[in-house]
Amino acid sequence: MDAHNDQPKTALSEDARGVPPAWYPDPQGGWRLRWWDGAHWADQVVVPTAPPAKRTSWDDLTIVFCAELILAFGAFFLAGILVMGVDSCESDRCVELYQRAWLLLMAVSLALPIVCGTAFFWASRAKWVAVKLLAVLVLPIGTGTGWAVYLVMTDIAMRA
């Protein structure tokens, strides 16, 4: 491709007279590019080193992370509703433990999306895929752990 214009164009049919000479996708198919001399297809064929890249406006990690953020904030609002569970406590110790569990859950449910979201979108601008991936993994793991701790603490509270 170094002897001619290196930019591939759209595919042409054999009757495309008057189209400028350039590399075009091979009319016989595949990833190959074939040289169009302006009148005929040449025997010159090249195979690009990589397949054409798919262009999307959102990469897969961003879609997954946005879904995780929606679920994490949903968990925050659900945690806000759970404070009403303290009514089932019969002792002051139960109320105290339940309130601590609830405050911990609220803090985790609010802090994780903010911290992970900041890291994810900051890393997106810096093009640091590892940090983006870490944020995608930490958010659901941290949220799940926060809820597990909450459930254990409320179970202990109800037994107190």
Image: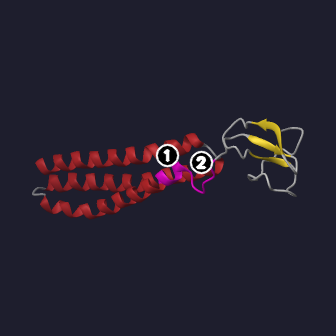
Q: Is residue 90 left or right of residue 5?
A: left
Q: Residues within 10 Å of mark 2 (few under 14, many from 20)?
A: some
Q: Which residues, given as a range, are shown in magenta?
A: 54-65
Q: Secondary structure at mark 1?
A: helix
Question: Taking 84 as reference, is 103 left or right?
Answer: right
Say if mark 1 contacts mark 2, CB within 8 Å.
yes
Question: What residue does disc 1 label?
Answer: 135
Q: Nearer the viewer, residue 47 or 92?
A: 47
Regarding residue 115, the answer to whether it shows in the image is no
Who's the residue at 13% across and 57% down the image?
A: 89
Percent from the top left, x then y, of residue 20?
87, 54
Task: Tell me the quadrant of the picture where the N terminus can be found.
Answer: top right
Disc nearer the start of the sequence (1/2): 2
Q: Quadrant of residue 71?
A: bottom left
Q: How many marks?
A: 2
Taking the view exactly as shown, the residue that stands out farthest to the left is: 90
Query: Label 1 amino acid?
Result: Ala
Residue type at the position of mark 2: Ala
Q: Is residue 53 left or right of residue 47?
A: left
Per the image, the residue denoted by label 2 is 123
Residue positioned 22% across, 45% down in the render: 152
